[in-house]
């Protein structure tokens, strides 16, 4: 089974053992709600057993389609917003070369990969069109509802480009649609045009969908081993399927953040120590924000990329309003490390670090920051992930999905709906005079 993701509290005084004990019965109840799928929104709990029962036939089709895209495309554009792109982007940024798109083609395992449809910026779209003009292009348009404005607008532009460049028939072969199995404008269009289509399972909502075709196709196009991701998720299913709070790191995390929330810690800062985590943090923010933030409740999920943000937000975190706690997401063994060389002359005074690695220094920074935060009144949690690999990516996704559902049920909200998201859409469409 390999090593496990670990959870611990830096400062034992913020949450005492007896406080966790009091939550034991609630965790048992929450565990039953999640696994029986009888809790609020249970019809969207398909992600719970997905690592065991995912559709193998579709999974093989994903790998085959990804292989073809790698062979025929210089650029692959993923069009989607929210849960329809954040998962894929988080995996690609965490598991690929930091400058993947800039690598020479023969050093990459697939085409350049870009994302569109997650904003309405004319500059972003125009500039993306600029860099794809001369290149062989394939699109993956992803929308469960098939009606979301942002991806639909971007898709309209790129579909038109493809049809002009390759003709209607040629364009059809370069468009893959990931959407609902029977409804929505995108499904209708995909059927009419005969696009290759993948399905977003009915019982899995956008933010819980990274381990379906929504995430797996783009991830596989990026040359990442999705079998390993699913294996890691399956181990997560086993580890975080334990009912007992004492044996389940995922429930310990959920219970601890719930206790802190009730003590007025209404902001959670996810602290990571490598820019490769920037989009994992975005994925995590959507997962927790959309799942917990309702009925006048919810922890505000914020993120910081350290050590960068210690030089911008550090002061506020250490010394500002005491309404936050931090959760450090730490990778024990990064994909890449680098030794610090000894120079002939110690002109920069850094020779005391010679022979150490950058990861070693980063680790000391992390430990220093956690200790400083704990002493400054910022409760400090830590989630340690053994390795930066597809296997542990899958396990980490499952860990947070389960922790999120448990957290929402502990808070007394439905983890799987997002009624608040509709409010801006109604106002916007009315201002746009949508018929
Ligand atoms: O989690 C969710 O359900 C949302 O964030 C959706 O993923 C997002 O709004 C995109 O929706 P759709 O895939 O229907 O275009």
Image (spheres, grey):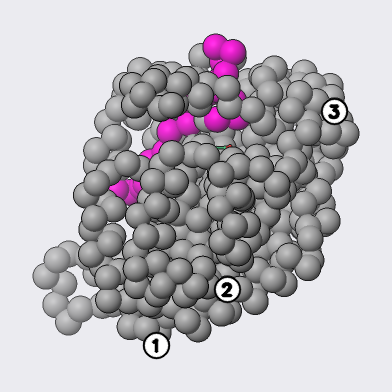
- N-terminal of the pair, mark 1 or mark 2, is 2
Which residue does the image show at 56% across and 61% down from the upper left?
A: 193
Front-most of 202 and 364? 202
Q: Is residue 367 left or right of residue 68?
A: left
Q: Secondary structure at mark 2?
A: helix
* Disc marking residue 354: none
Tell me if residue 276 can be seen: no
Spatial CA span between label 1 and label 2:
17 Å
Q: Which residue is mark 1?
A: 106
Q: Which residue is mark 2?
A: 66
Tell me if residue 199 can be seen: yes
Q: Which residue is mark 3?
A: 38
Q: Is residue 109 left or right of residue 207?
A: left
Mark 3 and mark 2 residues within 8 Å of each other at the beta carbon? no
| Quarter of the image where the N terminus is located | bottom right
Give the foreground label among 3 and 2: 2
């Amino acid at each position: 089974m390999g090593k496990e993701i670990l959870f611990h509290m830096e400062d034992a005084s913020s949450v005492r053992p007896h406080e966790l004990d009091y939550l034991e019965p609630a965790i048992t109840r929450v565990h039953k709600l999640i696994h029986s799928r009888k809790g609020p929104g249970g019809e969207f709990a398909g992600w719970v057993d997905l690592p065991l029962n995912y559709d193998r036939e579709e999974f093989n089709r994903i790998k085959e389609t990804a292989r073809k895209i790698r062979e025929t495309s210089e650029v692959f554009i993923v069009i989607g917003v929210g849960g329809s792109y954040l998962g894929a982007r988080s995996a690609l940024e965490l598991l690929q070369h930091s400058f993947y798109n800039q690598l020479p083609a023969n050093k990459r395992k697939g085409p350049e990969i870009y994302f569109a449809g997650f904003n309405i910026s004319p500059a972003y779209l125009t500039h993306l069109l600029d860099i794809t003009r001369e290149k062989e292009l394939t699109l993956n348009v992803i929308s469960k509802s098939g009606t979301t404005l942002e991806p639909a607008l971007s898709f309209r532009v790129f579909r038109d480009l493809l049809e002009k460049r390759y003709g209607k028939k040629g364009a059809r072969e370069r468009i893959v649609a990931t959407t609902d199995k029977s409804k929505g404008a995108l499904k209708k269009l995909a059927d009419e045009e005969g696009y290759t289509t993948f399905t977003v399972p009915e019982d899995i909502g956008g933010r819980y969908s990274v381990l379906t075709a929504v995430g797996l196709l783009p991830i596989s196009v990026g040359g990442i081993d999705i079998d390993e991701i699913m294996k890691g998720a399956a181990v997560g299913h086993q580890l975080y399927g334990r009912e007992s709070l004492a044996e389940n790191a995922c429930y310990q995390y959920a219970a601890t953040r719930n206790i802190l929330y009730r003590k007025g810690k209404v902001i959670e800062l996810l602290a990571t120590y490598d820019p490769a985590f920037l989009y994992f943090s975005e994925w995590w923010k959507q997962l927790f924000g959309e799942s917990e933030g309702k009925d006048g409740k919810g922890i505000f999920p914020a993120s910081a990329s350290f050590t960068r943000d210690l030089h911008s937000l550090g002061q506020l975190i250490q010394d500002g309003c005491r309404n936050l706690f931090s959760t450090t997401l730490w990778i024990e063994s990064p994909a890449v490390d680098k030794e610090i060389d000894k120079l002939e002359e110690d002109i920069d005074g850094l020779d005391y670090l010679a022979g150490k690695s950058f990861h070693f220094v980063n680790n000391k920074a992390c430990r220093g920051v956690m200790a400083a935060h704990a002493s400054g009144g910022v409760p400090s949690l830590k989630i340690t992930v053994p390795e930066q690999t597809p296997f542990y990516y899958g396990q980490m996704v499952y860990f947070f999905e389960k922790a999120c559902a448990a957290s929402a049920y502990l808070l007394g909200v439905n983890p799987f709906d997002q009624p608040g998201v509709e409010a801006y859409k109604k106002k916007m469409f009315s201002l746009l005079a949508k018929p």
